[in-house]
Structure formats: C-alpha cells, structure tokens
Image (cartoon, helix red, strand yellow):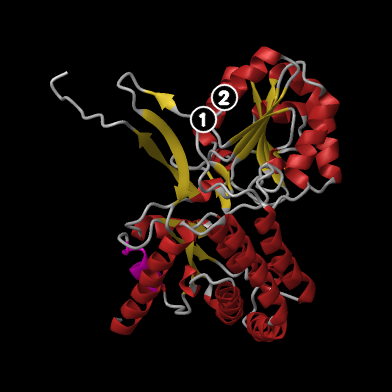
C-alpha cells in the first residue's frame, strides 16, 4: 500500500505543478501541443495496436461480451479517428480568459467575471481506450492537467496512448505531468486518489452506474457525473401525430443503448386513441417491446402491463414504457418523480404549453418538437464533450470545454477601501 500511495501521490503532485503552467499557456501553445499529440499517436500506432491486440485477445478468452470487446478494440481507422479528434479540439475556441462586460459598483469598483481553468481533473473510466486521448485533449485545451485511470482490461493500450500524449506535450514545450496515467489496476489506487482533495480539483467518472456510485461514495473531491438517462417524450393534445411518431421512433429505436434515448413515452389522453395504435405499429416494425399502463393497454391490448419499476427503468434496449396522462401538469409531475435530469421533450403545437414545459421540466436539456437523441456535445456545437452532467452544480448537460473551466471575479479599483460602518 505504501508503494501504491507514493505512486499516485507523485502523479497528483506532478499534475498540480503542471496545471500552473497550463493555466497561463497561450492558446497557440496548447493547440500546438494537441496537434503534436495527434502526430505522436499516429507515429506510435504500431505500439498502441500491438498492446490492444493482446488485451482484446484476453477479453475474448475471458468470455467478455461482443459489445465489451467492440468498445475495447482499436484498429488503424479508429486510432486515426482518435488523433483527428485531438486536432478538432485544437480548432475549437479557447474558453480560458474569456470575460464578461464590466459592471460598475456605486463606489466606483469595476467588476467582471473571467473564465479560468479548474486545475487538476481526475477521470475514472472503463474500458474504452479512446477516452484516454479525448479526456486529455479536452482538459489540455481548457488549461487543466488530467489524471487518467482507465479500466484494467485496457491498461496496456491506455499506457501506450498516454505515452504518446506525453511525447506530444514535450514536443510543444509543456510539462508531461499534464497527462498523468495511473497504471495501477487495483481499486485501492483510485480510493487513494479520491482522498487527495488538496491536489485534485474535480473527479469525472465515465462508465456504468456502479462506477459512478463508487466514486461518489468514496470521494473527498467534488464529482461531476451523470445519473441514469431516464428520458421522456410527452405527446401533447393536438400535436402533429406524424411528427410525434417520427420523434418517438428516433428517440427510442435509432440507438437504444445510449443515455439520451427515450425510455418512457407520455401521451395526453386527448391524443392517445389516435396516436397509440400508429405508434405501436411503428415500434413493432422497429422491434420495440411496449409496456403500457392500464389506459394505454385499453387502446393497444398487445402491450405488456407496465410494472411500477418500469417508470424508473433505464432499459438501454428496445423496450419502451408508455403512459397516458390527463394533462401537461400530470406529465410534468411524472417527469419530476421519475426523470433523472438528462433530457426531456414535448411534442406540441401550443406555444404556451411549450413554454411551460421548457420552464418546468427539470433536466440538463429540454426540447420542443425534437428528439432527445440530440443531447450530445457534438450536436450542441461544443465540438467534443467530457460527458453529460445531470447535476445542478458547476456544469449541466453535455460538458465541453467551458464545463472544464470555472469563473473568478476580476475587480479593478482606484484605491477604494471598505468602510464597515456603512
């Protein structure tokens, strides 16, 4: 334990020191480093892919699922895509140093806010090697040092990627400690990192619910994470039913295994009799199993009965729960009870009800007449994202470069002093 503690402490201290240099690095230098990191990845592709082949073979021998093996696997095309992603980050606007307009206080002080780096960001993730470069690149552009701890199944691949990234940093004249890689696969190493609140400023878990819960439970450091993605689409009375069908089908069936897919469809009772039969036909053609409440099943008897647990289920599969509600208020009440704050949508022709939904639906992204599947950093014009936050502190929704920074007040005076007697 002493060796493990010493090792991760040293990585965290190096990251903290590097973060001071990154905080003042000009945009041109950071962009040069990102492009150098991309070149180093391509130059070392043989080493990265050789390590990956070993780990993919081990995963197959261990009987891991095809989906797991696919997430773990790299080839030259995928690795080049990782390098291109770093180059795209270099092309993004730099949020660091951006300021709000000055406001003048009655005493003559001039105040504004300036966007600044967070410092050191620890990313704990599972076996998707591309995250190593994605996370490091986003942190670098935001002026943050990154500490990276991936899944044990990809430790060799991740180590080779991290080595390439550090080579790029050195080529650009930035400290290699800005990308720290934790090679220790033991969970005790993560628990030790989560104690280092004097050195690490933010933790981002990227993985399943078990990982997120463990990090939240053990961390002495603020955690930016997302809960399950129980997303809803509400079809209002008088909605364009063709539009509603298209949106619902996309939100559920286009890619059901992602967090921004719809899990529950809410339908106003005034639209249910006309809408649900056509919806059931479309969903059946897409291979979607429907689980309905009593009202929905009276209209479409082929639906399976929905249990109470279905309203809180993140299926990540071709399964959809369906509920008929009496009003927009009932739909909002259901979302308040069962939503997880990721994304919610309404399909309506009524501008006032749309405005109410936008105001009252509690989520990081709220839609009128569009699919929840757009909840993504790239789709929102962020260029890339670290993940989707369902929390209400610091950053919410897709977290891009700006979400990896914070604000400080900048105050200009002319010799003012405070008189506490006033």
Q: Could you tell whether 65 is left or right of 335 in the image?
A: right
* Magenta-colored segment: predominant secondary structure: helix
Q: Residue tagged by mark 2?
A: 332
Queried whether the magenta region covers residue 189, the answer comes back as yes
Label disc, if present, on residue 37 of the rendered structure: none
* Residue 246 in the image, given as x and y percentages of width and height: 82, 34
Residue positioned 55% across, 36% down in the render: 339
Vertical side of 273 occupied by 119: above or below: below
- Whether label 2 touches label 1, CB < 8 Å: yes
Q: What element carries label 2?
A: helix
Which range of residues does the magenta coloring cover? 188-196
Q: Residue tagged by mark 1?
A: 336
Q: Could one spot residue 352 in this view of the protein? A: yes
Alpha carbon separation for disc pair 2 and 1: 6 Å
Q: Could one spot residue 392 in this view of the protein? A: no
Q: What element carries label 1?
A: helix
Quadrant location of residue 133? Answer: bottom right
């Amino acid at each position: 334990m002493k060796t493990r503690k010493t090792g991760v402490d040293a990585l965290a201290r190096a990251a903290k020191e590097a973060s001071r240099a990154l905080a003042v690095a000009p945009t041109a230098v950071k962009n040069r480093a990102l492009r150098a990191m991309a070149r180093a990845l391509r130059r070392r592709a043989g080493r990265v892919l050789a390590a990956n082949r070993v780990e993919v073979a081990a995963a197959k021998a261990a009987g891991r699922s095809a989906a797991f093996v696919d997430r773990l696997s790299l080839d030259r095309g995928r690795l080049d895509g990782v390098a291109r992603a770093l180059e795209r980050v270099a092309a993004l606007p730099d949020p660091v140093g951006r300021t709000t307009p000055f406001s003048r206080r009655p005493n003559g002080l001039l105040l504004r806010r300036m966007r600044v780096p967070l410092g050191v960001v620890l990313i704990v993730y599972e076996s998707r090697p591309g995250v190593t470069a994605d996370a490091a690149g986003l942190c670098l552009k935001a002026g943050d040092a990154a500490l990276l701890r991936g899944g044990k199944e990809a430790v060799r691949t991740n180590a080779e990627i991290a080595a390439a990234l550090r080579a790029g940093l050195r080529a650009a004249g930035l400290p290699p400690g800005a990308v720290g890689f934790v090679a220790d696969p033991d969970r005790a190493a993560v628990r030790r990192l989560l104690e280092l609140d004097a050195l690490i400023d933010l933790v981002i878990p990227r993985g399943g619910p078990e990982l997120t819960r463990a990090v939240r439970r053990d961390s002495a450091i603020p955690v930016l994470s997302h809960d399950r993605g129980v997303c809803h689409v509400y079809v209002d009375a008088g909605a364009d039913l063709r539009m509603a069908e298209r949106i619902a089908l996309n939100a559920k069936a286009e890619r059901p295994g992602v967090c921004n897919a719809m899990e529950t469809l809410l339908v106003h009772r005034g639209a249910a009799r006309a809408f649900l039969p056509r919806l059931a036909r479309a969903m059946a053609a897409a291979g979607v199993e429907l689980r309905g409440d009593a009202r929905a099943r009276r209209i479409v008897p082929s639906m399976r009965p929905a249990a109470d647990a279905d309203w809180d289920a993140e299926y990540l599969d071709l399964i959809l729960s369906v509920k008929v509600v009496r009003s927009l208020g009932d739909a909002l009440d259901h979302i308040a009870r069962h939503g997880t704050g990721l994304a919610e949508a309404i399909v309506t022709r009524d501008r006032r009800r749309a405005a109410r939904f936008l105001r009252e639906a509690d989520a990081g992204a709220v839609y009128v007449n569009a699919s929840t599947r757009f909840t993504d950093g790239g789709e929102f014009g962020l260029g890339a994202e670290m993940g989707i936050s369902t929390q209400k502190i610091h950053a919410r929704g897709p977290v891009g470069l700006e979400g990896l920074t914070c604000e400080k007040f900048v105050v200009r005076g002319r010799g003012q002093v405070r008189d506490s007697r006033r």
